[in-house]
Image: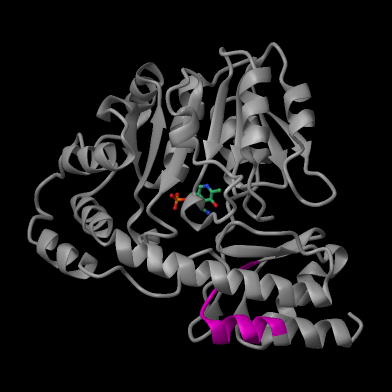
Amino acid sequence: MTKPIRDELRQIPLYVPGKAIPDAVKLSSNEVPYGPLPGVAEAIASAAGDVHRYPDLAVVALRDALSRRLGVDADRLVTGTGSVALIGHLLQAIGGPGGEVVYSWRSFEAYPIAATVAGLRSVRVPNTADHRHDVEALIAAVGPDTRALIVCSPNNPTGPAVTAAELDRIFEAVDESVLVVVDEAYREFVTDPDCPDAVERYGDRPNAVVFRTFSKAWGLAGLRVGYMVAAPEVAEAVRRCVIPFAVNGVAQAAALAALDAEGEMRRRVALVASERKRTVMAARELVPEVPDSEANFFWLPLGDRTVEFAAHCEGLGLLVRPFAGDGVRVTIGLPEENDAVLEALRRFVEAGR
Ligand code: PMP
């Protein structure tokens, strides 16, 4: 007997996580390679004594800490079970029949899934030949049914970030009834001064929504804490969609401790950024089309050779993230891990594959 399941859900692909194989070097999920920040493990141990209690529903201490750090009123902040959950909730808040959401492709794989679940039609705008958002084409794709335009900056999985001029142009061109969503999961890794901090530059706009996460630079991927900044009315609507107690008490304590270790976070991020520069330059000698990256990963546009290269890496104990027929995303790891990737790439290219 046919089960009462929505047809469109059968058509969306399941989210594919980066592979994890014991003893392999994992460069497939854009995590930082250094372990938790100082003070985080202690905060987790101390919060563990309270796990028989529900956590603070309103996440007051963490929201206040973020509010002070970002200079944003707490009523503009929403926390959730990773930013991926909040992306889903935002689209639920604006979803329903007839609506569309515009975003670049290729970009973060969760967008089409979240859009479909929210009952929104996806309008995908191809990236430029150099793997950047095509800003004019994104603007042109916005129509009367568009409820949100998502900008992923830096873009997962290709790496470039949008410039202030590009984002200014989007905010100018798009009607205020359309939400301009800037997904800044990798913001802390950005070094190009032309690429703006969207909270700082657009935080006050009524249609701006910015997503951030503790999963990447802050080293808490396993605890699932993300947040968003938006106009109070939008934040309130998203809060209504969030499942109660979405951020557990251990995660709240760990995120607070991570914020206290901001100096060390910045030091680690600087190491990643310098390794990124070195690795991208070396990779480009083998694959000239490798685009600039402002994130903690880089993109190898290998087209038809994508799956073969990922298998070649796996054979050498290196896990990378293939997007079949398109390219491979490689997380920046420790220097010796990046060297191993470059060596794998050299062998692959020299073998004429
Ligand atoms: N946005 C982008 C662009 C991402 O790459 C990711 C993680 N892969 C997320 C959001 C979600 O991160 P999290 O749910 O761990 O906060």
**Which percent across, then down, holds residue 162?**
65, 42
**Which residue of the protein is positioned furthest toward the front in this rendering?**
193
- Residue 328 in view in this figure: yes
Tell me what residue is drawn at x 40 percent, y 36 percent. 228
- Where residue 274 sits in the image (x, y, percent)? 56, 71
Q: Residue at x 64, y 41 (%)?
A: 163
x and y percent of residue 196 in the render?
54, 41
Decide if residue 86 is on the left or right side of residue 182: left
Residue at horizontal 45%, vertical 65%?
Answer: 269
Q: Is residue 187 left or right of residue 63?
A: right
Identify the magenta region.
330-342
Query: In screen coordinates, is 52 left or right of 107?
Result: left
Q: Quadrant of the C terminus?
A: bottom right
Note whether 270 is above or below 100 in the view shown: below
Q: Is residue 121 visible?
A: no
**Residue 340 against residue 283 in the figure, above or below:** below
User: 68 above or below 42?
Assistant: above
| Left or right: residue 86 compared with residue 128 | left
Is residue 1 on the magenta stretch?
A: no
The quadrant holding residue 293 is bottom right
Q: Residue at x 79, y 62 (%)?
A: 301
The quadrant the N terminus occupies is: top right
Q: Please identify the quarter of the rendering in which residue 126 is found.
A: top right
